Image (spheres, rainbow, N blue to C red):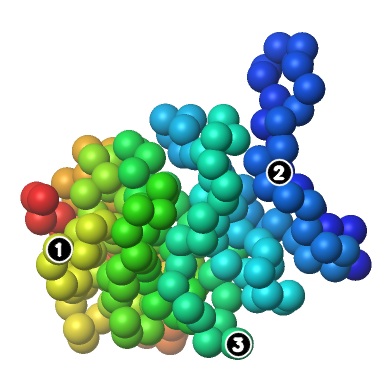
Amino acid sequence: MFDGGQIFVVPMEGRHTPLPLTAPLPSGRDIPTLLVSPDGQRVVYLADQDTADQREIYSVPADGSQAPVKLNGPLAPSVDVFPYNVRITPDGARVVFTAGNRLYSARTDGSQPAIELESAFVWHEPFQITSDGARVVFRGTQLNSVPVDGSAAPLQLSPASSTLGSDFQVSPDGRHAVYRINTHDANGNCSMASSACPSTAVPLPSS
């Protein structure tokens, strides 16, 4: 059993008393995920803070000036925010996460309700945010991209007839997504390392 959990911040010089950002959790609860926004202003974390054994997502200012805020909306009792699929946009303004095989985006300061980016099935595999923070590329039954603010519907990037491999990458400039499909040769299914599994690059829409 975990013996509770609490988040602190301390200057790198270590000359000051650590500042608590959260209250201690009861014994048996935990904080499995902890992220700092790229601008250093906020700490985003997952915890079963309000309900035992249900992990939700929270944010707190890194200077401790305000109490933590919950970023997700109400969840069904059996649904958690997935601990290994949380990403903050490069500007620190939004955080993207999955819960119950659905994809969500929320303001890191909690100033607006979380929005659902995709209501269909989303794999619990790492999605990627483009370098400009404008779009999220994720895997459902196919590879898709969607504006991080939910201003447009998801766009399917891979052909519907393809059997998508588990890995994909977004180019550093955010203009292309590269993915692999599973194909078959005379001996049967190819492995992901086989030359029979081609890579395909597709352009991402500008936002």
| 113 vs 160, nearest the viewer | 113
Q: Nearer the viewer, mark 3 or mark 2?
A: 2
Q: CA distance from mark 3 to mark 2?
A: 26 Å
**Front-most of 57 and 177?**
57
3 or 1: tag closer to the N-terminus: 3
Q: Position of residue 153 (x, y in %)?
A: 15, 72
Left or right relative to 41: residue 135:
left
- Give residue 135's position: percent from left, percent from top: 23, 54
User: Which residue carries the number 3 mark?
Assistant: 78
**Number of other residues with Cα within 10 Å of mark 3, as a class: few under 14, some 14 to 19, many 20 or more:** few
State the mark number for residue 7. 2
Mark 2 and mark 1: Cα distance apart in space: 34 Å
Is mark 3 in CB contact (under 8 Å) with mark 2? no
Q: Which mark is residue 75?
A: none
User: What residue does disc 1 label?
Assistant: 151
- Number of disc labels: 3
Q: Is residue 108 above or below residue 74?
A: above
Callout 1 crowding tier (Cα within 10 Å): few <14, some 14–19, many ≥20: few
Label 2: element kind: loop
Q: Is residue 137 above or below residue 100?
A: above
- Disc 3 to disc 1, C-alpha distance: 29 Å
Residue 28 x/y as whole percent: 85, 67
| Label located before the other in sequence (2 or 1) | 2
**Residue at (83% x, 63% y) in the render:** 26
Task: Please name the residue shown 9% across and 50% down the image.
Answer: 206
Going by the numbered disc 1, the residue's amino acid type is: Ser
Q: Quadrant of residue 155?
A: bottom left
Q: Is residue 104 left or right of residue 149?
A: right
Q: Amino acid at mark 3?
A: Ser
Amino acid type at image mark 2: Ile
Disc 1 secondary structure class: loop
Q: Is residue 47 left or right of residue 44?
A: right
